[in-house]
Image (tube, rainbow, N blue to C red):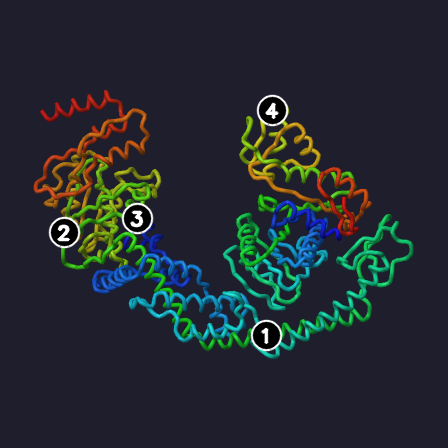
Amino acid sequence: MEVSDLLLDRALASGARSIAVVGTGKNVGKTVVMRAIYRAAIARGMCVGLTSIGRDGEANDFVDTVAKPRLRLAAGTLVAGALGALPRSPALQWCECTDIQSASGPLAIVRVRSESEVEVVGAPTASGLRGCVASLFAHGADIVAIDGAIDRIAALREEDAVVVCCGAASSPSVEAIAAEVGALVALLGLSRYDGKGAALRVDGAFTPTHAATLIAAGERRAVVVRDATRVTLRGRALLGVLSRLQIRVERPLHPVAVTVNSVGRTGSVEPQALLQAVHAAVALPTFDLFAASAA
Amino acid sequence: MSADEFIDRSSANAIGEEWLAVAIEPRSAYGARENAKRRRFRPGEEREAMASAGRIARIAECLDPDLMERALARLARLPDISAALARVAVGDSLDDAEALAFLRFADGASELQRALEGCDELPNCAGEAVEALRVLFERGRVGGHAFYLHDSFDDALRSERERYEEARARFEAARGRLERKVAEALGRSARFDEEFIVLREELAKPLPSGVRVVREAPTYVLCEIDLDEESRAQLERREEAARAVALAEERVRAALAREVFTLGDGLARATFALGEIDLVLAAASWAQRFACRPAELDAAGEIQIVEGRWLPLQERLESAGGAFVPSSISWSGAAIVTGPNMGGKSVALRTVGFIALCASLGLPVPAQRARLALPPMIRWLGIGPDDETRGALLSSFAEEAVRLRDAFRALAPRSLLLVDEFARTTTPREGFAILVASLQSARERGADIIAATHLAGVAAAAGARHFAVRGLRGIPTPTPGADIDRLLAALADCMDYRIEELSEDRRESSDALALASLLGVDEGIVLRARGILKTIAE
């Protein structure tokens, strides 16, 4: 079985029908993972819906203008994308023009009729994303893949299976990459507050200052925040706080797998070492789509 | 319905103009455009205003509420084709999203026409042009309402697409052969991504041909499939075929745009008709919901309102499980309304203003029966929700005086002045004098003025008709610790909000002490106040 099939199986095993792909930073292989999930689903005869949180799928990175891996879509694929970014040719089947707005115009639901490359500029908000995913399912998608972004996880939904991508582009060493993604997965995987036991509710952001104060006071209650986006700690600092405080959320997310990319724009790390170190740090199935390996 | 000479912002707020604007707001872009052109009927246009209200009332009567709601929902979903029509009018092409909009527009307009067919009061919104539009885009219909620039639009498009598919298949086959060759050499499956890694430890010999190294690392090489000459040639043919498809598609879009252009006048008429239908249906739905009826508009007669209702409050009360008590009132020239606190004096004034506002917009009015003139101006004079506009520069009385000055400067015959407890913040003696003088002056200038007041003797002094709220049927028993909502509900149960005309200017009770007691004012204070009242009376 191919690694991309294993990754898709893992996401579907969680019961989710929508899979969001987020990365620890830019150029960590997010689009490669999207493409792998997409191709594996297409190979199984599934009708795939695609969308993104904000802008993604373009040929060149919008921020640093470096060429990005392309996403070539097969006939039958559904896309929720901005009107201004969808191609005129080959002609698409236009299913619905929605009221959901993006920087590139209102979003439309289209079906690819002839294999083509499509830039997917999705909804920038959580409610817009929910609307897009619902429309994709309404038009017949079996699964929906969401090209996400770490700075836009607020738009992720409880029902999404989240695949986290990490790689040499965001940190300089195997250890640093593993620590960074370990903290991110711990953050995304914060458990729901079950209502049992004493709790301290924190409205708004949970900052390092909050954390230091509570640790110093020997806080034993569960510290409840709305969702993972409210926690502003990252990396080792976050892991340290999680070992001392019981942080819980009202709206949990569901990370199901992690992927690694040992190749960065300016350097690279040893693939097998990275795969093993990340797997140990996240305690989730871990995949290297470039090297076709899994842990 | 913006603030203008007819009604200023403060008066509009007091009467509930914004509530009305929302309640009768059309649902579609077409209706919104017609709504922006909506104008008020002026004195002298009584016949036109009555015709408008009559038409809305007849539609409200003949259409089932569910049908009306479904029609309005359909209008809300109708795509706006105006921008696309403007584009084709200047010779521009169409895009496929616009083609989808045209198809859905034609479907929606036709469905709407069929649904409303029994109602003669509404224009036809699906004439020949709409049907021609539907036929034009029908070939692109997929399933219910999706659109695709289908091969059947043009034979050349079909053949270019076939050529592209052949070219694509040949390229895929050539690349597939390369991938299989590379996979065999590397001992992997044949599915390669754009870039892939080969570990050096896996490499017993140099990389096979057909693989290009993107980057070397100590333990692996990052590679991609390197197209050979045949694959590159097939890729070039595929790209060329794709360009030909794009050109063929553009030709079809341009031809469709030209066809739409020829339908432009008919489609423009359909959009106007849809706007009118939306506007009238929204008003009819509102009129039906609130049992509104056309008023009789008479430039010369007195104002007669039977069982009038102020809808913003009626809606609020009904949503909370309560009921609104209608009020009836008739006068010409000057009238006053007296009665207890919280008895509905201000609401009676707002009801009159709201009914006049509806009539001036050509709408049925919320009353069992109403007869009035079209007012050239409506002014609310009194402490209202919008009286902080001049900040702390003016005292409450000064603010009232300025508004009185402005109203009288613009006063014309049949202007409607609604005066709510005017001058209550100055001495009762001087307040009385100003109020009586205002009532007399307004009447002399042919305006209709009605004032709510607690001041005694105003009606007699001004020669005005005198109406009074019946007031409390008994004193509710205060419940210690009850919240304000329960207290108000207890009060509402005991209050008779009906208004009756008094034959003479009798001394009124405001039931103020009973209310103070009910609302929890210290009982010692209330008892002492009762004693003082008794002393004054003796």
Q: Is residue A26 above or below residue B364?
A: above
Question: Mark 4: which amino acid?
Answer: Glu
Q: In the rendered structure, find residue B332 and report the number of the disc placed on it.
A: 2
Helix, strand or loop at label 1? It is helix
Residue at 29% x, 68% y is B120
**Percent position of residue B506, x then y:** 10, 37
Helix, strand or loop at label 2? It is loop
Question: Mark 2: which amino acid?
Answer: Ser
Are labels 2 and 4 on one chain?
A: no
Question: Mark 3: which amino acid?
Answer: Gly
- Pointer 2 or 3: first along the chain: 3
Q: Badge 2: few (under 14), some or many (20 or more) residues near its Cα, within 10 Å?
A: many
- Pointer 1 or 2: first along the chain: 1
Helix, strand or loop at label 3? It is loop
Q: CA distance from mark 2 to mark 3?
A: 23 Å
Residue at 51% x, 66% y is B100
B94 or B379, which lies in front? B94
Left or right of B310? Residue B77 is right
Q: In the rendered structure, find residue B151 and report the number of the disc placed on it.
A: 1
Q: Does residue A260 appear anywhere in the picture? A: yes
- Pointer 3 or 1: first along the chain: 3
Q: In the rendered structure, find residue B54 and report the number of the disc placed on it.
A: none
Q: In the rendered structure, find residue B16 and report the number of the disc placed on it.
A: 3
Q: Badge 1: few (under 14), some or many (20 or more) residues near its Cα, within 10 Å?
A: some
Residue of label 4:
A219
Question: Mark 1: which amino acid?
Answer: Asp
Residue at 62% x, 57% y is A48
